[in-house]
Amino acid sequence: MIFRPMILADLERVVAIEKQSMPSPWSRELFEEELNRTQANYFVVEEEGTLGGYIGYWEAPEEAHIITLAIAPIFRNRGLGKRMMDHFLAFAARKGARLATLEVREGNEAGRRLYEKCGFRMVAIRKKYYSDNLEDAVVMIREIAEAQAPPFG
């Protein structure tokens, strides 16, 4: 598995995974904007020479807020999401984050299971958070300790 920064050349595959994974997929243009955002960090994971998923987060003082995460359908249920999260947490810890936060759709059971497996816990519900269908968001957090960060690579 290779975990590396997302680049413009990745966007065709990233957008394809996005369309397969999200009820309201982002456009290529939105990903381009995010790649240019100073406080944003976006990564892809490659396995067997194929882009298998991506994660993006925003940096805030001592916090890493996950904005998006998706795994290509052919790579799901193989532990790739957990390994990607471990690398993200290690990277964020090295950048000074002490807390990771996210929102996940209440109905996204697979996503919620992944985050719980990665040590996140629910702290709140944001009612009617998602504008496409007014679904509630589950707010989750996890502390990040340097000692918990696995080796990066």
Image (cartoon, helix red, strand yellow):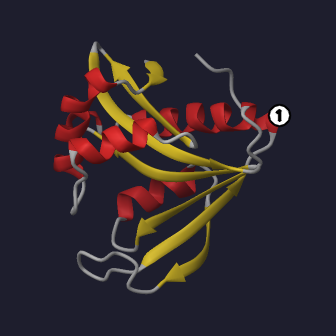
Bin the neighbour count of mark 1 within 10 Å (Cα to Cα): few under 14, some 14-19, many 20 and up: few
On screen, 150 above or below 15?
above
Number of marks drawn: 1
Q: Is residue 21 above or below residue 53?
A: below
Give me the residue at 55% from left, 57% from top.
116
Identify the amino acid type marked 1. Answer: Ala
* Residue carrying label 1: 147
Residue 5 visible within the image: yes
> In this rendering, would 127 be left or right of 122?
left
Q: As rendered, which of 118 and 142 lies closer to the eye?
A: 142
Residue at the (24%, 56%) spot, across then down: 22
The residue under the point 38% across, 85% down is 128
Residue 79 in view of the camera: no
Percent position of residue 113, x then y: 46, 58
Rendered position, 132 above or below 147: below
Residue 127 position, x and y percent, is 44, 86
